[in-house]
Image (cartoon, rainbow, N blue to C red):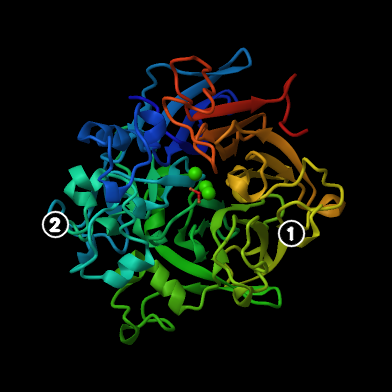
């Protein structure tokens, strides 16, 4: 019943029937844990050294600190407070039972000795960003799930798939104490992670569902929009150097009048992957078994396999290799879609393309997609680069912020984002402080239209060692929630630990380590944030 570690995505679901700006459920992802900041006397954790200091008890604490939190909050006399003993309050962790649903559920690749049906998984891990649906559920996205697996790939039935997903990365000690995180002992367990999980916070007894129709990859987020024909559309980034941008369109329309009718809407639909052509057009190519190259003679045996190993389908479809796709958000005012591309130090000059024009891209950029005819389900789109990030004062960087952007106004490494009701883009950064620019991470507001387009302004900065996550507005834009993740984490050449942290934010107590925390930002005197 404790808040977890390393808060990332933040979503807010107003309490039905109440004042949407004053009372609601806050849902928060707990992406990962930092053992050196959580436990005394611990150094860097390495598999080859046997994870010194990591006991079974500490591993179980880490597992309990992953997942997500649901809390109720209320704004009383201008201040947000946690509502104690809220009926909906709950923790979802790396051991919470959840169901696999949709076309891949029950497939042989998802079966284990503990789950011979291939339909029930314990827990969700590395939940990075996410989304809130119009029917009030929480989409929370498993990203770097490869980090949690140990063991040898020798004798594994699908070694190429392990390699394509970076498994085992052996970053956590979990597999020492729990056989399901050792691929030598439980070869299919990695296939049960890397999904979008749908949780109903308004029903505390509900079981989370991993929606296999949306594909398995390193999901960053699940920003979404109801298309004009009523179908529900989710844009998704696969956060890896040279990986892809995806889109999921439901088969059925969303029903705004009947919440129950949307309960399993995400189990049927079409997953597609983006191709960005050099002439500024683009297309969505569907990951559908039997279509195009996705046929048995190319190694694609079923729709389930295509979804479980979606990256192979993206490869076969000729998807454009991107500079680490992070959040993707739709501008409700214009229907334009913004794709955060955070960086890519693996792109060589010979590998640049129109949508990823910089070799060794240290600073990242933002691509803007215009769906054809304003139709988010259309096969085609046009696109352009909104801004190439980095310091505009250094010509070699090639940044394209507007000339009105000040020395504090530019940023690098866009990651999470939000769009307010006026159409302004708010960008959270990850990596500024780790060496690409020497400045701290934070939130920057970016104008998207008119003469001010690509003008950025600094809005919020995180403490030392942290990255900026979250950003999420209440429906009336009067509160802006942000998540400060991993404050005090060691950075290039600057060591930090539980015993000797570089900051004790936000408690500033001598016996308290820094703690990842959600911050609620409101405007002095009231009103919409950013006005
Ligand atoms: Fe967990 Fe892609 O940031
Ligand atoms: Ca993160
Ligand atoms: Ca992120
Ligand atoms: Ca990131």
Q: Nearer the viewer, residue 148 or 273?
A: 148
Mark sitting on residue 116: 2
Q: Name the secondary structure under disc 1.
A: helix
Q: CA distance from mark 1 to mark 2?
A: 53 Å
Write the residue at 29% across / 43% down: 123
Q: Nearer the viewer, residue 498 or 291?
A: 498
- Please tell me whether residue 258 is drawn above or below residue 183 in the rendered image: above
Q: Are marks 1 and 2 in contact (CB under 8 Å)?
A: no
User: In terms of sequence position, does the residue under pointer 1 or pointer 2 come before the other?
Assistant: 2
Left-right relation of 187 to 290: left
- Crowding at dot 1, Cα within 10 Å, few <14 / some 14-19 / many 20+, comes out as some
Residue 26 can be seen in this image: yes
- Please tell me whether residue 328 is drawn above or below residue 377 in the rendered image: above
Q: Is mark 2 within 8 Å of ligand 1?
A: no
- Crowding at dot 2, Cα within 10 Å, few <14 / some 14-19 / many 20+, comes out as few
When asked about the image quadrant of residue 216, the answer is bottom left
* Circle 1 or circle 2, nearest the eye: 1
Mark sitting on residue 297: none
Left-right relation of 93 to 529: left
Residue 39: x %, y % from top left: 35, 28
Write the residue at 78% across / 33% down: 531
Q: Residue furthest top?
A: 77
Residue 84: x %, y % from top left: 41, 16
- Per the image, the residue denoted by label 1 is 397
Left-right relation of 219 to 369: left
When asked about the image quadrant of residue 88, the answer is top left
Residue 132 can be seen in this image: no
């Amino acid at each position: 019943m404790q808040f977890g570690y390393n808060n990332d995505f933040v979503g807010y679901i107003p309490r039905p029937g109440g004042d949407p700006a004053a009372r609601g459920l806050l849902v928060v992802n707990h992406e990962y844990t930092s053992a050196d900041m959580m436990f005394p006397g611990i150094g860097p954790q390495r598999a080859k050294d046997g994870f010194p200091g990591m006991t079974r008890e500490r591993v179980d604490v880490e597992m309990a600190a992953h997942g997500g939190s649901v809390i109720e909050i209320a704004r009383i006399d201008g201040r947000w407070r946690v509502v104690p003993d809220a009926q909906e309050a709950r923790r979802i962790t790396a051991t919470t039972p959840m169901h696999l649903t949709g076309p891949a559920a029950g497939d042989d690749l998802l079966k284990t000795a503990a789950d011979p049906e291939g339909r029930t998984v314990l827990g969700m891990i590395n939940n990075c960003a996410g989304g809130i649906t119009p029917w009030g559920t929480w989409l929370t996205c498993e990203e770097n799930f490869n980090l949690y697996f140990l063991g040898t790939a020798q004798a594994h039935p699908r070694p190429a798939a392990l390699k394509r997903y970076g498994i085992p990365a052996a970053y956590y000690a979990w597999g020492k104490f729990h056989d399901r995180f050792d691929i030598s002992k439980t070869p299919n367990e990695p296939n049960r992670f890397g999904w979008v999980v749908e949780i109903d916070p308004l029903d505390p007894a509900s079981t989370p569902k991993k929606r296999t129709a949306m594909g398995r990859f390193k999901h960053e987020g699940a920003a979404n929009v109801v298309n004009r024909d009523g179908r529900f559309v989710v844009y998704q980034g696969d956060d890896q150097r040279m990986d892809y941008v995806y889109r999921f369109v439901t088969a059925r329309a969303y029903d705004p009048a009947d919440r129950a009718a949307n309960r399993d809407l995400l189990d049927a639909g079409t997953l597609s992957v983006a191709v960005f052509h050099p002439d500024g057009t683009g297309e969505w190519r569907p990951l559908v078994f039997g279509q195009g190259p996705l046929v048995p003679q190319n190694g694609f045996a079923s729709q389930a396999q295509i979804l479980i190993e979606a990256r192979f389908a993206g490869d076969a479809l000729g998807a454009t290799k991107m500079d680490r796709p992070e959040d993707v958000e739709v501008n409700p005012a214009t229907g334009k879609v913004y794709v955060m591309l955070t960086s890519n130090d693996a792109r060589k000059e010979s590998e640049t393309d129109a949508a990823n024009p910089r070799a060794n891209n240290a600073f990242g950029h933002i691509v803007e997609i215009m769906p054809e005819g304003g139709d988010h389900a259309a096969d085609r789109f046009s696109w352009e680069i909104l801004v190439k990030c980095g310091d505009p004062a250094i010509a070699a960087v090639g940044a394209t912020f507007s000339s009105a952007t000040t020395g504090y106004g530019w940023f690098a490494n866009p990651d999470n984002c939000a769009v307010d009701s006026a159409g302004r883009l708010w960008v959270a950064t990850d990596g500024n402080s780790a060496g690409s620019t020497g400045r701290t991470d934070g939130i920057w507001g970016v104008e998207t239209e008119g003469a001010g387009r690509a003008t950025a302004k600094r809005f919020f900065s995180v403490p030392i060692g942290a990255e900026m996550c979250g950003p999420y507005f209440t429906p009336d834009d009067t509160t802006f929630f942000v998540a400060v993740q991993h404050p005090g984490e060691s950075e290039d050449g600057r060591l930090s630990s539980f015993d000797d942290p570089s900051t004790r934010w936000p408690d500033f107590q001598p016996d308290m380590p820094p703690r990842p925390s959600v911050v609620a930002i409101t405007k002095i005197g009231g009103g919409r944030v950013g006005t």
